[in-house]
Image (cartoon, grey):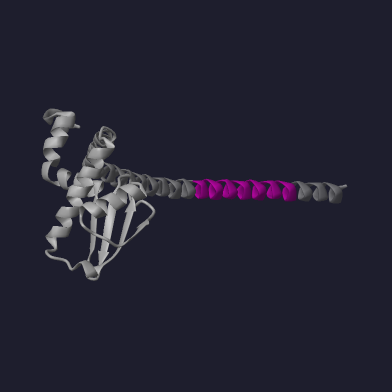
């Protein structure tokens, strides 16, 4: 009987000891988990801080870049608007020209450009090319300039008529586009102000 009681007592002691060890193990685990969680939270906080820092830097850089581009973008938009208005004015001016006036302008420009090179020997005339006018009109322009040579139509280089003469030494081109470009070069500011006004030109 005493042996049975001793065995039961020993079993209880073993069970109590096991429970205590289990509690200690659980407590150690809880403490380890809590410590690990705290470490992870610290690392996450550091990472979040770094991410915020990088994001704020990127935001600042992008903002600075946008602000720096604003004057350039505004100037580009202004120039594009001005070019659009000038192009529209060019097209309207050309549409209002009679065919006779177009040929007169080309003839005057052609003769002026030929005379710029002084006395060119007629034997040096090689080929003439044209676009934007008919073969008959091109022949008329050559005749007005006292030129006789082979003539050929070529694909247009721009929207406006032109006639071109190749000699032994130079290529001479007379075109409505060159007339427009020359006019714009001399009177660009005046034309822009006439189109949109001085105040709008300064603030567009």
Q: Is residue 74 magenta?
A: no
Residue range of the region highlighted in magenta in the rendering: 13-37
Residue closest to the eye, 1 or 81? 81
Q: Residue furthest right?
A: 1
Count of numbered labels shown in the rendering: 0
Q: In the figure, 49 relative to 152: above or below?
A: above
Q: Is residue 28 magenta?
A: yes
Q: Residue at horizontal 82%, vertical 50%?
A: 7
Q: In the figure, 117 relative to 185: above or below?
A: below
- Quadrant of the drawing holding the C terminus: top left
Q: Is residue 204 visible?
A: yes
Image quadrant in which you'd find residue 45: top left
Residue closest to the eye, 178 or 145? 145
Q: Return the x and y of residue 43 as percentages of the image width and height.
A: 44, 50
Q: Return the x and y of residue 70 as percentages of the image width and height.
A: 24, 40
Position of 82 compared to 202: left or right? right
Q: Is residue 83 visible?
A: no
Q: Return the x and y of residue 12 as percentages of the image width and height.
A: 76, 46
Position of 17 compared to 127: left or right? right
Q: For the stretch drawn in magenta, what is the main secondary structure? A: helix
Q: Return the x and y of residue 28 as percentages of the image width and height.
A: 57, 50
């Amino acid at each position: 009987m005493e042996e049975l009681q001793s065995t039961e007592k020993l079993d209880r002691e073993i069970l109590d000891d096991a429970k205590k060890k289990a509690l200690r193990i659980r407590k150690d685990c809880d403490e380890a988990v809590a410590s690990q969680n705290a470490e992870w939270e610290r690392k996450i906080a550091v990472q979040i801080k770094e991410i915020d820092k990088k994001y704020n830097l990127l935001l600042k850089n992008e903002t600075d870049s946008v602000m720096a581009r604003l004057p350039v973008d505004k100037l580009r938009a202004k120039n594009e608007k001005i070019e659009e208005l000038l192009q529209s004015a060019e097209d309207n001016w050309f549409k209002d020209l009679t065919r006779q006036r177009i040929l007169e302008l080309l003839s005057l420009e052609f003769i002026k450009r030929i005379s710029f090179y002084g006395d060119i020997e007629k034997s040096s005339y090689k080929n003439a090319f044209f676009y934007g006018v008919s073969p008959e009109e091109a022949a008329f322009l050559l005749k007005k300039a006292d030129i006789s040579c082979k003539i050929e139509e070529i694909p247009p280089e721009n929207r406006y008529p032109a006639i071109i003469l190749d000699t032994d030494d130079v290529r001479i081109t007379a075109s409505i586009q060159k007339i427009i470009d020359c006019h714009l070069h001399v009177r660009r500011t005046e034309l822009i102000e006439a189109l949109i006004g001085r105040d709008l030109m300064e603030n567009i």
